[in-house]
Amino acid sequence: MTAVVLPRKLSVRSDRRRTLLTPEGIALPIVLASRGTRLGALLIDLLIMFVSLLVTTLILAYGGIRLWGDTKGGEPGAVQFLIIAWLVVVWLTRYAYFLVFELGPRGATPGKRITGIRIAARNGGRLTAEMVLARNLLRDIELFLPLQLLISARGIEGTDYAGLTAGLWFLIFALFPFFNRDRLRAGDLIAGTWVVEAPKRKLEAALSTSGPALRGTSSTTGVSYRFTDAELAIYGEYELQTLERVLREGRPEAMAAVHEAICRKLGWNPGAGDERAFLEAYYTQLRARLESGMRMGRRKADKNTPGTG
């Protein structure tokens, strides 16, 4: 089922609110990240990349100087190896930094995590490797290439047109988020992603993996919810994140829809009146199972991933 963006009501707080309908038919409210927050996250990430590259450069340079002095210049091949290693580090810093972090379970780089935002799929589904790869390849065209051209043009006489072209190139892509209502950069538009605010509130103590929800006893009805390993194996990390968002928002209609969907999947007869206790128990027990699996080197991305046994 293709997810769609539902019509939204006018909000006195912000025009950044959206509502997603997930492939499971669950309506989830989200808030788009502001342009200023996205810029701040990018600057933090670029600073981290610069410092990491600077430290690596100093270490390799020190190693090269020591090696050159110890061999009295007799091992140029070893020094060339250090130069190649430096070029590899530069390449990885430029391309792998965003890919590795955004492909992680949080869908966010350190800069995004610090500023409280993350990447999300606009279709309401799971963030895929293809989406992350596409948006980051476009970042090269949007940011790094025009900056390189602009810097190189300043050091060569008679390159006014090249510098002007690079400046316009950079400016067009930098202003792109200001000309669409969803604040998308070109990479987001191509990849089918957007950047949203990550929930800042922590879940209640009942969702602790050692709390009453894990034990499965409802404080409202006294009913004990305990799920078998086979019942928990149906879902993976993506469904866990969706369930966490539903519990954070606390919207009764969304919890009722998720409760019914899980019950049908498990073969249970969905009742009514104790949806939150059921979902809290399922959430914490599923999370404990997934965390245990990751400690053992097993990972289940979503319900379509084969069970880990």
Image: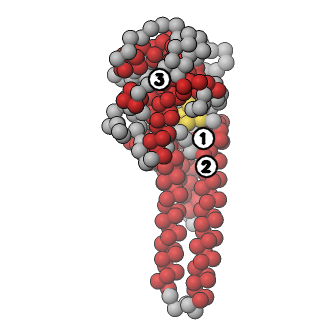
- Which amino acid is tagged 1? Lys
Furthest toward the top, the residue is 272
Q: Which of 216 and 5 is in front in this view?
A: 216
- Which amino acid is tagged 3? Arg
Question: What residue is pinned by disc 1?
Answer: 112
**Image spot of residue 257 (x, y percent):** 45, 14
**Image spot of residue 5 (x, y percent):** 46, 20
**Image spot of residue 291 (x, y percent):** 50, 39
The label nearer to you, 2 versus 3, is 3
* Residue shown at 52% from the left, 62% from the top: 90
Q: Judge whether 97 appears above or below 106 on screen.
A: below
- Identify the secondary structure beneath mark 2: helix
Residues under numbered marks 1 and 2 in contact, where contact means CB atoms less than 8 Å apart: yes
Question: What residue is pinned by disc 3?
Answer: 226
- Identify the secondary structure beneath mark 3: loop
Q: How far apart are marks 2 and 3 (CA)?
A: 43 Å
Q: Nearer the viewer, residue 4 or 215?
A: 215
Q: Judge whether 187 appears above or below 199 on screen.
A: below
Residue 222, can we see it? yes
Q: Quadrant of the C terminus?
A: top left
- Identify the secondary structure beneath mark 1: helix
Q: Which of marks 1 and 3 is nearer the N terminus?
A: 1
Q: How far apart are marks 1 and 3 (CA)?
A: 36 Å
Q: Which of marks 2 and 3 is nearer the N terminus?
A: 2
Q: How far apart are marks 1 and 2 (CA)?
A: 8 Å
> Label 1 neighbourhood size at 10 Å, few (<14), some (14-19), many (20+)?
many
Question: What residue is pinned by disc 2?
Answer: 45
* Residue shown at 40% from the left, 31% from the top: 229
* Residue shown at 60% from the left, 41% from the top: 112
